[in-house]
Amino acid sequence: MARSKINLLVIDDDDINIFIIKKIVEKTGYDVDMASQANGKLAIDYLQEMLDTNGPFPDLILIDINMPVLNGWEFIEAYEKMNVDKNPHMYLLSSSVYENDIEKAKTYAIVNGFISKPLAIERLKELFDALD
């Protein structure tokens, strides 16, 4: 296993997706502390609070694209402006099958990749293993 505890942040406005990801995380066998936020604005606020309070900053962030208030792309742009000195692995996790979304994800240096929903247990284990 990669590390003692993995801090995971899932940014998704769909409660069912959050529930499914939580169940998949449990099945990986890894020690994971999972937080979720319903949109990019709440996620930015959460990350700022973690920075301000020296709380556990995510090792891995999974970002849905289509959300209210601040979508996935807007979240990434807002995160870049935060000038955070931490480098969590970030993946867009979307049901989008549009090639332009996949290509757009590649234009952001801080985005590690694009994952199509649904998230598979094997893929999540790969993401956890890549954190070292």
Image (cartoon, rainbow, N blue to C red):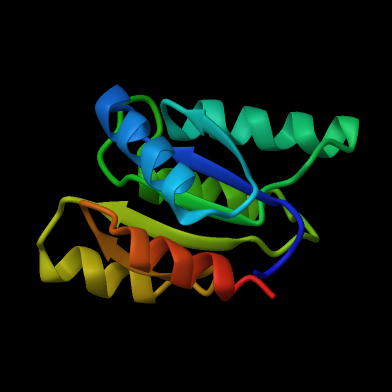
Residue found at x 52% / y 74%? 109
Quarter holding residue 96? bottom left
User: 112 and 18: which one is in front?
Assistant: 18
Q: Is residue 82 left or right of residue 107?
A: right
Q: Could you say where residue 106 lies in the image, as x and y percent from the top left? A: 36, 76
Residue found at x 69% / y 75%? 132
Q: Could you say where residue 99 lies in the image, as x and y percent from the top left? A: 13, 71
- Give the vertical position of 4 relative to 53 (above or below): below
Q: Could you say where residue 57 lies in the image, as x and y percent from the top left? A: 74, 46
Quarter holding residue 105? bottom left
Quarter of the figure with the N terminus: bottom right
User: 5 and 60: which one is in front?
Assistant: 5
Q: Is residue 1 left or right of residue 17?
A: right
Residue found at x 30% / y 46%? 65
- Give the vertical position of 68 relative to 123 (above or below): above
User: 72 and 112: which one is in front?
Assistant: 112
- Give the vertical position of 54 relative to 15 (above or below): below
Residue found at x 21% / y 51%? 118
Q: Is residue 34 left or right of residue 127?
A: right
